[in-house]
Amino acid sequence: AWHFYDDAGVLCISLHVDQSDLHVFPYLKGKPLERGVGPGAGCTMNLPLREGMGEAEAVRLLHEFALPAIANHKPDLLFLGLGFDGLLGDPSGAGLRYTEAFFEHVVSACCASCPRIVCTLQGGYLPEAMAEAVGSALRVLAGGVPSRPLSSEVDADFSTHLQQVKHDLEDASNWWPIERSFAYIPEGFDVEEETGDEDY
């Protein structure tokens, strides 16, 4: 998203586990308040999930925000990056609870949004589960329909989370300038301890 942050011609949407307060990203933090700048304001959309959330919450965010934004943007080409490290139990510790069903449903929804689609595979360290998920995604890309039902189990706090994401995405008066993304340090985060800086 950083490369297109001021570009109104490119819509960048990211659905990810919220790690913004772990301070692991050097530039953009993945917060809903980071919406782009200048002509590109509103063309970046971050949809964070809390650790422990899964496909029911993810699909709700996609249908509530991402798919309408794609339809409004009317893209000529859609790039879809599938992060298989979101599969339940992945040793990367991403902390999400996706099943194979999630990926085939996402691919199906994206294909319906734009007939020209480029799909890339990203992450994933459970060979058998990833093989199933990739196979399902490829089958849908080839014209099939989703064959597995999605989980309906929703985190107890998801409604509050959804409303906060919605508020942050829509309240342009509070969107972050690029300087705030660069300068942001989570509350209570010890920069010197994390970087190993010491006084000699």
Image (spheres, grey):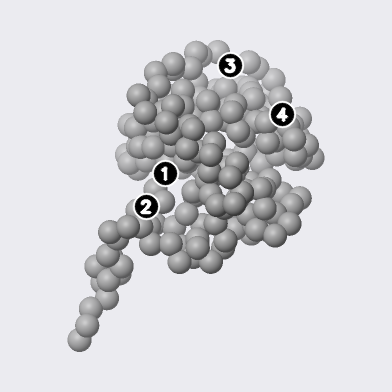
Q: Disc 1 versus disc 4: distance between alpha carbons? A: 26 Å
Q: Outermost residue, bottom direction?
A: 200
Q: CA distance from mark 4 to mark 2?
A: 32 Å
Label 1: few (<14), some (14–19) or many (≥20) C-alpha neighbours in 10 Å? some
Give the percent coordinates (x, y) of residue 191. 31, 67
Q: Nearer the viewer, residue 90 or 183?
A: 183
Q: Residues within 10 Å of mark 2 (few under 14, many from 20)?
A: some
Going from N to C along the chain, the mark reached first, 3 or 2, is 2
Q: From mark 3 to mark 1, how far is it between C-alphas?
A: 27 Å
Residue closer to the observer: 143 or 49: 49
Q: Say if residue 133 shows up in the picture.
A: no
Q: Which residue is mark 1?
A: 18
**Residue 184 sits in quarter:** bottom left
Residue assigned mark 3: 146
Marks 3 and 2: CB-CB under 8 Å? Answer: no
Tag of residue 113: 4
Between the C-alphas of marks 3 and 4, the distance is 16 Å
Task: Indicate the secondary structure of the residue bearing disc 4.
Answer: helix
Would residue 108 be seen by someone viewing this image from the given angle? yes
Instruction: Report the Cα–Cα distance between label 2 and label 1.
Output: 8 Å
Which mark is nearer the camera, 3 or 1? Answer: 1
Spot occupied by residue 129 in the image (x, y as percentages of width and height):
41, 27
Do the residues under discs 2 and 1 have CB atoms within 8 angstroms?
yes
Three-letter amino acid code of the residue under disc 2: Asp
> Could you tell me if the residues under marks 3 and 4 are in contact, i.e. CB atoms within 8 Å?
no
- Residue 21: assigned label: 2
What residue appears at the point 45 percent right and 66 percent down from the top-left corner?
Answer: 183
Residue neighbourhood size for the residue with mark 3, other residues' Cα within 10 Å, grouped as few (<14), some (14–19), many (≥20): many
Lower position in the chain sequence, tag 3 or tag 4: 4
**SS under mark 1:** loop
The x and y percentages for residue 107 are 61, 28
